Image (cartoon, rainbow, N blue to C red):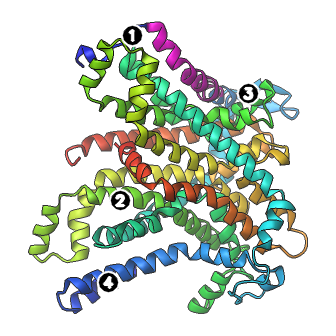
Amino acid sequence: MATSSTSESTLARLLPEDVDTEQALVHGGLIVSIFLMGLPLLLALIMSTQTTTEVYEVTNVGIGSQGLSNYGTVLGEYNFGQYMINSVVMSIIIVVGKVTLSLFAALALVYYRFPYERAVFMFILLTLLLPVPVRIVPLFDLMARLGWGNTLMAITGPYIASATAVFLFRQHFMAIPASLVENAHLDGVGPLTFLWKVLIPMSKGMIAGVSVITFIYAWNQYLWPLIIMSDQNKQVVQVGLRFLQAASQSGLTRWGIIMAGAVIALLPPLAVLIVLHKPLLETLAIQQK
Amino acid sequence: MPEFTKPYESRWQAFLLLLPTFAVLIAFLYYPGIETFRLSLQQTILLGTRKTFVGIENYITLATSSTYHWSFAISVAFAAVVVIGTLAASLFVAYLLFQVDVGSSTYLIAAIWPYALPTAVAASVLLFLLHPSLGILTFVLESLTGTSLEWFTNGPQAFAIVALVAIWKQLGYNIIFMVAALNNIPETLTESAKLDGVGHLKMLYRVYVPLMSPTLVFLVVMNTIYAFFQTFPLVDLMTSGGPNEATNLLIFKLYRDAFEFSNLGLASAESVVLFAVVAILMYVQLRLSESYTTYA
């Protein structure tokens, strides 16, 4: 990519100083880059319609004769329908749980006077130092002792509280005009009513943004479900991709089926990103600060 | 903070509101986190049924193990390749996005979508498309370069392929932050530089990159954490750590030591090392972002 950037700017210098030429080059560069980024998916889509024999003809990049039937096969025969449901349920529980818990925590941090406020906030923020791999062995052990192996609690519980979400809601609440808070207080509005009637309506964008980030993050989980869910029927779709590969290791690998599975596993987070890209971008902009 | 911004006084209410978050953080983050340190000083015997205190023996094992040294070295190299590759490619696309006049929101979505790409999906798709004998991309690459792609048996090639997939998956995330940073740069600056006849590349390196440095520091840290922790599915699905340990990254080795070889004490010591890596990175980010605040 670096080489094409140099050749492009040389081109730009050779051509007359014309805004339109420049823009044409920018558009051209963008279209080429975006095409290259999307190419693997485009090819995966095409291959997902091919039979195993067609896949094994390496240079065959036409739409295959299977049509969409590989999708039906992977969803039914290979249990991907069940994995998809499991992933959706897991992700929704994590999103709803995290947003609710973080709204409560942020409400307390911003609108309550209590001792050691700073320390409490630091206690939450410091958990950023403890991603799953840092605590994976004892966490596994704990789940086993709680009898939570193979349960939804095990794959959602560790994720439903987070420093990032609390931090984002706290930032947002602090930006809400003091006069509004004062009015609410004078009117004798209780904290939960204040949260429900004032804070949540004023934080819709932020809540949507946190939900998208959380959904995509939850959907991407692989290592933890792989370890804690030994019952194949309860597994999530990302780990389901591993079963697809393992299932076809004897004999010819059914790559058309695997590509169909990969495309299906990408669709939900991609749809969420496309629909909610605006609040997502605004929220990420704040996360960086 | 003036008094009216904190309208509620009740301590027990505040406590109740914080309780669910605290319960989850203590039970599933702090407790296991601290347990990791304790376990790292123990040795498990008889398939985990008995544990004995061995002090820093596990750390000594790690410090003297050549396979661990290897894993550590390739993880650092892997992170370096992924960070540099991702930043360079994303900067190129983000800079183009920044300069485009029409259709920018369509382009933006088309460029940031890999943010939603699950790592396991990226791994499955490219495992096939770059398959040494079946991959269409392998076919194209081999006919373009005249070399043969044998990454199922060739270590350095496997390392490069896994890094390439890791970079691809991380592009969207980086482009989002870079576009945001570029859009924050005052337009007058761009205009005056243009009047001075500064070329595009020079403009990027002399003007934009320095002004984007807080974002770039943030991205270096986030990409490094990603390269260390979130690339497990790539190794697991594409190479299983091979060939010849060429892709046996720390996170994959940790998983194997813990859940395949049941060496829980040793795996915990490896977790503690990873904790040190995150801690150092977070510290670097905090210090650097403080020193850059003049730009923000």
* Span of residues in magenta: B11-35
Mark 3 vs mark 2, foreground winner is: 2
Q: Is residue A97 above or below residue B77?
A: above
| The label number, if any, that marks residue A115 in the structure image | 1
Per the image, the residue denoted by label 4 is A25
Q: CA distance from mark 1 to mark 3?
A: 32 Å
**Amino acid type, residue under disc 3 in the picture:** Leu
**Amino acid type, residue under disc 1 in the picture:** Pro
Chain letter belonging to callout 3: A
Per the image, the residue denoted by label 2 is B178
Residue A73: percent from left, percent from top: 83, 67
Q: CA distance from mark 1 to mark 4?
A: 59 Å
The kind of secondary structure element at disc 1 is loop
Between residue A122 and residue B69, name the one nearer to us. A122
Per the image, the residue denoted by label 3 is A142
Q: Does residue A71 appear left or right of residue B15 in this picture?
A: right
The magenta stretch spans residue B33: yes
